[in-house]
């Protein structure tokens, strides 16, 4: 079996057409494994959108059976540089509305710009990946690019990185791709052409292949290597917007998410049954960078937490379709996580009863709490570490709730058993952009709202069952 080598030119052209999908193109990188105490080439992240550049030295290793380069179970792909990167980008730039960003050390910036035919739109100068301003600059740049892209000012952003030692180049590329996953991120120091013929690559109908064994991880290589190198893990956030009937609310949430001061990696819309196909089609047009997951039937409030298991980011945030956040809400949650890891939400309840759900005190957007507060449960928007979902589903029982309620109580109960509290971040009156919900009273009082639709009493049973299972409430 042979593994196909994609051409760099063809790959970039294909990804320019994908509005909500980006690609990471990087060079080989060797790393040391303590288990074997020997050098092995880096295992690529588990992503079909990650690509390894096969250069001449690497190909010679493969040819002589000396290669220890592995991609993740054949998912990550290999490419070869069929033309100089400079020529590829310059030619594609003539025919497409692109935004080209160069990231490099200051010492080579002038030479890189003057010696290339690429027209750069922005340049970000970093001495190395430990530069204190790198996160701030990336977030600022990401917010600007996401907003410009949503306004259709350009078709695709291409981010070029060069001029760093291989380890630093990889670390910066992973960081950049985690903050701007819709972009084409190319982290290659050598921009010159490497012709496939000079590599003596096997040709079959003008396509290039290498032996497929380079795409399989040996069993003796620890899985943590791949986990560590996941480009969309550390510090990144995926948002899931639940949609049932409030189509207008979803569009407003989407706009606020694009404007976040801490950019999101992905935005998904979980469509919990199609109420109006025409409105859904219109919504897709309004949300070009969102990905839609559609259920043919209403399978209740728990399903969004099941779909979230697919997320590849460290954090997940879920929104009810009537919960429109301020543009600093994600930043607020990240800041709170840095001080105290907890399940976070924009409205929290502290119960005055162990059996009656509706007897509680509310904290959050309804009370404008000036500081972070511990609560029994949170709702409307949930911010949490994606990995915590395994506790959520491990503790699930058929009696945990019903199809339209109980999921919020259950999450706090499941995490409490792991020593993880539930909190509401600050909702200060002087800065409502930090709030998790700006129009809750305006949008959340319709017939779809469980608490005002005669279903509030149905929440009593899940609360009582969780208390019986050991759920410890603050007031008791």
Image (cartoon, grey):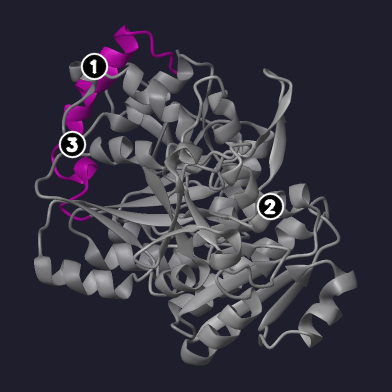
Q: Is the residue marked by circle 3 packed among few (<14), some (14-19), or many (20+) residues within 10 Å? A: some
Q: Position of residue 4 (x, y in %)?
A: 41, 54
Q: Secondary structure at mark 2?
A: helix
Q: Nearer the viewer, residue 403 or 462?
A: 403
Give how far apart the Cα atoms at labels 1 and 2 are: 55 Å
Q: Earlier in the sequence, mark 2 or mark 3?
A: 2
The residue that disc 2 covers is 57
Which residue corresponds to mark 1? 397
Report which residue position mark 3 lands on: 404
Q: CA distance from mark 2 to mark 3?
A: 58 Å
Asked if 142 appears above or below 470 in the picture, the reply is below
Reply above or below: 251 against 115.
above
Q: Select label 3 or label 1 by which is in front.
A: 1
Coordinates of residue 374 in the picture (x, y in percent): 54, 29
Instruction: List x then y, in percent, for residue 393.
Output: 32, 23
Graded by Cα atoms within 10 Å as few (under 14), some (14 to 19) or many (20 or more), the crowding at tag 1 reads: few
Where on the picture, by quarter, is residue 249? bottom left
């Amino acid at each position: 079996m042979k593994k196909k080598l994609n051409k760099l030119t063809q790959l970039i052209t294909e990804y320019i057409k994908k509005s909500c999908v980006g690609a990471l193109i990087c060079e080989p990188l060797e790393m040391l494994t303590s288990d074997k105490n020997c050098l092995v080439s880096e295992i690529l992240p588990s992503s079909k959108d990650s690509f390894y550049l096969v250069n001449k030295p690497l190909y010679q290793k493969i040819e002589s059976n000396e290669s220890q380069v592995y991609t993740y179970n054949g998912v990550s792909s290999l490419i070869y540089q069929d033309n100089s990167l400079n020529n590829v980008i310059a030619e594609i730039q003539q025919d497409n509305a692109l935004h080209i960003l160069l990231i490099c050390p200051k010492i080579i910036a002038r030479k890189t710009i003057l010696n290339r035919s690429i027209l750069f739109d922005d340049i970000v100068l970093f001495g190395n990946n430990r530069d204190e301003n790198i996160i701030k600059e990336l977030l600022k740049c990401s917010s600007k690019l996401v907003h410009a892209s949503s306004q259709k000012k350009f078709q695709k952003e291409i981010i070029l990185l060069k001029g760093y030692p291989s380890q630093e180049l990889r670390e910066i590329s992973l960081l950049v791709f985690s903050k701007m996953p819709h972009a084409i991120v190319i982290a290659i120091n050598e921009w010159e052409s490497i012709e496939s013929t000079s590599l003596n690559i096997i040709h079959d109908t003008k396509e290039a292949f290498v032996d497929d064994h380079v795409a399989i991880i040996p069993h003796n290589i620890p899985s943590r290597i791949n986990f560590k190198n996941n480009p969309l893990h550390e510090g990144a956030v995926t948002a899931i917007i639940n949609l049932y009937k409030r189509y207008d609310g979803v569009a407003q949430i989407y706009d606020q998410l694009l404007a976040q001061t801490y950019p999101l990696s992905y935005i998904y819309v979980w469509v919990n049954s199609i109420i109006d196909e025409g409105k859904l089609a219109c919504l897709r047009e309004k949300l070009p960078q969102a990905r839609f997951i559609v259920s043919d039937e209403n399978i209740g409030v728990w399903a969004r937490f099941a779909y979230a298991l697919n997320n590849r980011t460290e954090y997940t945030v879920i929104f009810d379709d009537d919960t429109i956040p301020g543009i600093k809400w994600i930043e607020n949650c990240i800041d709170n996580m840095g001080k105290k890891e907890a399940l976070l939400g924009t409205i929290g309840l502290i119960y005055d009863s162990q059996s009656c759900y509706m007897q509680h005190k509310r904290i959050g957007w309804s009370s404008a709490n000036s500081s972070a507060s511990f609560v029994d449960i949170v709702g409307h928007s949930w911010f949490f570490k994606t990995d915590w979902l395994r506790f959520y589903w491990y503790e699930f029982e058929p009696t945990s709730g019903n199809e339209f309620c109980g999921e919020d109580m259950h999450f706090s109960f499941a995490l409490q058993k792991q020593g993880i509290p539930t909190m509401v971040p600050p909702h200060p009156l002087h800065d409502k952009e930090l709030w998790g919900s700006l129009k809750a009273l305006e949008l959340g009082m319709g017939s779809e709202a469980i608490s005002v639709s005669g279903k509030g009493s149905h929440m009593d049973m899940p609360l009582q069952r969780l208390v019986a299972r050991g759920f410890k409430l603050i007031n008791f």
